[in-house]
Image (spheres, rainbow, N blue to C red):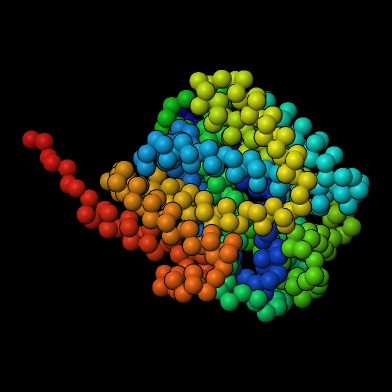
Amino acid sequence: MNIQRKELLVTSFALFSLFFGAGNLLLPPLLGYNAGDDWFWVAIGFMITAVVIPIIGILAHARLQGTLYDFGKKVSPTFSLIYCVLIYIISVAIPSPRTAAATHEIAIHPAFGTSPLLTSAIYFALVLVFVLNRSKILNLIGKFLTPFIVLMLLAVIGIGLFSSEFTTGISQFEAPLVSGILEGYQTFDAIGAVVVGAVIIVSLNFKNMEVEQYSSKRTLIRKSGFIAGFGLFIIYAGLIAVGAYYSSEISINAELSNDMQRANLLRDISIKSLGEFGNTVLSILISLACFTTAVGIIAGASDYFKGLFNNSQTVFVVTAIFGCILGVVVGQLNFNSIIMVAIPVLLFIYPITIVLILLNVLPEKFSTSLIFRAVVLVTFVFSIPDVIGFLNPSEGLAELTSYIPFAKHSLGWVVPAFLTFFITFLVKPKKKSVE
């Protein structure tokens, strides 16, 4: 079956929009601002965890064409079940409410002065409406919301770069590449890949998409992933560059919380790019970008728990309602508070998610059950010091981890995981040939 151009564009735009949320818009400008003349290296690091790994995750979905459960089932059914439940609880409890917090702080409160409770309540009521009409998610987001988001982003970036003086400050990062990698964690895009990728798979199963064959779906998802990834790359690089080149023109109050620094910087860039109209543009942009991501997260979680209970539509509705209620409660926290809660969680779950994504796109001979189990176990073990070091740093732990490559950058799991992969592949039992 030939893939129609319309289906490809709609799916690509929907995928981009489901990825692009609060952190994706707020994090890059301040990252570039602080990176100064090292903004290019910071951008490269950011792309690794915020673009490359997530798009590989979409390619894995294109190959598996199942649910999130399929990502970890080679480790063990029990592990995969626990992993899935953790991922969806984390997604519903942190990045989803974070979109409401960002919308309130940047778009709603400055204009109307309303309470975060009112904003979150209206916000997640609308999210629930969209999720309960999930068969229309791809078309609604892909045809209407995303093109508008992309056009506004390109306007801010293009005009901003064109009108800047192209001078940067001095970098505040000792290791720009690593700083970019770790900041990319905060976008939740690797987790988003395994969550919203499942939303795309389920949505494509509806008859109105007219995509039935495995090979056709795989081609459609892969092409859409590359197009969405290219769009994310352009937007992220542009936002980081704009933040770097405006560092000599815009001053941010270092005493403010990080979330307010991010919000004020992005607002100042929008005003310098589009005049006072930039405030309105930014408010609309934040609201739409956050909203589409929240819809994808809640829909993905609802789909998963629906599948656990014999495709019960009642479970789907109950999960969606629970996710939205939790969003209202947590969404009243400020953006920076949610990020601080997220860091130790990400240091634990992100490495496991990354290795599962990478292993699932490899050929079968490189991704046996033995390799899955060994690599995931080692990744888990070597991620523990990163989490403990963030929650309770001590000299003893620092001395112990000093022997682990990249441990001081919270990437101590990387080398052990790769070594385990190669060693396990080399020493795995050979299958006896059948004559």
Q: Position of residue 385 (x, y in %)?
A: 48, 62
Q: Position of residue 181 (x, y in %)?
A: 55, 62
Q: Residue at x 75, y 40 (%)?
A: 329
Label total for image = 0
Q: Residue at x 87, y 45 (%)?
A: 115
Task: Determine whether, in the image, residue 90 is placed left or right of residue 406.
Answer: right
Residue 13 appearing in the image = no
**Who is closer to the viewer here, 218 or 158?**
218
Q: Position of residue 414 (x, y in %)?
A: 43, 62
Residue at the right extreme of this rendering: 112
Q: Position of residue 364 (x, y in %)?
A: 30, 43
Query: Quarter holding the C terminus?
Result: top left
**Who is closer to the viewer here, 128 or 8?**
128
**Who is closer to the viewer here, 322 or 357?**
322
Residue 34 appearing in the image = yes
Residue at the left extreme of this rendering: 435
Q: Residue at x 48, y 34 (%)?
A: 67
Location of residue 183 (image quadrant): bottom right
Q: Residue at x 44, y 38 (%)?
A: 80
Task: Determine whether, in the image, residue 22 is placed left or right of residue 190.
Answer: right
Query: Quarter holding the N terminus?
Result: top left
Task: Determine whether, in the image, residue 381 is placed left or right of residue 148.
Answer: left
